[in-house]
Image (cartoon, rainbow, N blue to C red):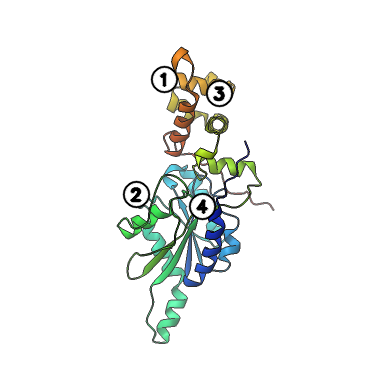
Amino acid sequence: MNIQWYPGHMTKAKRKIAEDLKLVDVVIELVDARIPMSSRNPDVDEIVGGKPRIIVLNKSDLADENANRLWMKYYTASNTKVILANSIKGTGLKEATVAAKLLMKEKIDRLKSKGLLVKTIRALIIGIPNVGKSTLINKMAGRSVAQTGDRPGVTKAKQWIKINQELELLDTPGILWPKFEDELVAYNLAFTGAIKDDILDVYELALKLLERLQQDFFTNLKEKYKLEDSHQEMAVHDLFNQIGKKRGCIIAGGEIDIRRVAVLLLDDFRGGRIGKITLELPPQKTE
């Protein structure tokens, strides 16, 4: 399955973000804690340039806790400010405000030394579709000010949101990149919902996800779907059908309802119901 999704509005959004950077002090980049590498748009480094940046590992509650610690250590070692967050519950969001103030401390002190009023820090929120930008903003603001949805492509226009006297945020549409050179990256994005399901073959996508989980996270599958140890050696199509039978996804004639099973698997993974799973670990340092 060739996965490519780059709606026309993303080109315009990318250009607009580059222009909006002139208006902000700090960039808050959200990535999905389950796929911290795949969910970082490779164009962002070029777009952001030398602007102070905070990496937010969002959806950290859905990721493996030990993997979260490894990613925190990885970014900290490269002198990148990083925080763990759950934008739905609000975990880690206060740290984002504190981090923004720390990044701007020198500039704020310089303004104070000149007797100038310290302005509100302006931060731009950036990230791929469906990574939780608008949800994070609403939680920080304590009110519904940014449109949200459990699907990519909800935010379409620029939105300024005043969080408090110290911080103002600029929400931006999620942006992907024109071509996924690495098939694994494309699948990771599709698994986590960053690419719209309606342009994908959900059956093939679910098989790919199940193959990955069967190989690396079989214990999670076993506990969720009451599987036997022998199922780990099954062909992935047979395991898919086995899960369908156990969940009662049967249609007339006793056949498996493959779309229903595919949607169930994807939804269970995305909702964390198969367990806390991280699909990527930090690169190993080479001597």
Disc 4 target residue: 128
Marks 1/2 in contact by CB < 8 Å: the verdict is: no
Which three-letter amino acid code belongs to the residue tagged 2?
Lys
Which callout, 1 or 2, points at the residue further toward the start of the chain? 2
Under circle 4, the secondary element is loop
Relative image position of residue 108 (x, y in whole percent): 42, 77
Residue bearing the label numbered 3? 232
Q: Would you place residue 149 above or below residue 210 in this image?
A: below
Please indicate, yes or no, whether residue 279 appears anywhere in the rendered image: no
Q: Mark 2 and mark 3: span between their CA atoms?
A: 35 Å
**Residue type of the residue flagged with mark 4:** Ile
Q: Disc 4 versus disc 1: distance between alpha carbons?
A: 35 Å
Comparing marks 2 and 3, which lies closer to the viewer? 2
Residue named by callout 1: 248
* Residue 36 seen in the figure: yes
Q: CA distance from mark 2 to mark 4?
A: 20 Å
- Mark pair 1, 3: CA separation: 20 Å
Tell me the SS state at disc 2.
loop
- Between the residue at mark 1 and the residue at mark 2, the CA separation in whole angstroms equals 33 Å
* Nearer the observer, 165 or 76: 165
Q: Residue at x 60, y 58 (%)?
A: 43
Residues at discs 2 and 4 in contact (Cβ within 8 Å): no
Upstream in the sequence, badge 4 or badge 3?
4
Residue 102 located left or right of residue 240: left
- Report the residue that reaches farthest toward the front: 8
Q: Which image quarter holds the N terminus? A: top right
Q: At numbered mark 1, what does the secondary structure look like: helix, strand or loop?
A: loop
Amino acid type at mark 3: Gln
Quick one: label 4, few (<14), some, or many (20+) residues within 10 Å? many
The numbered mark, 2 or 4, whose residue comes first in the sequence reads 2
Asked if the residues shown at circle 4 and circle 3 are in contact, with their CB atoms under 8 angstroms apart, the answer is: no
Residue marked by disc 2: 89
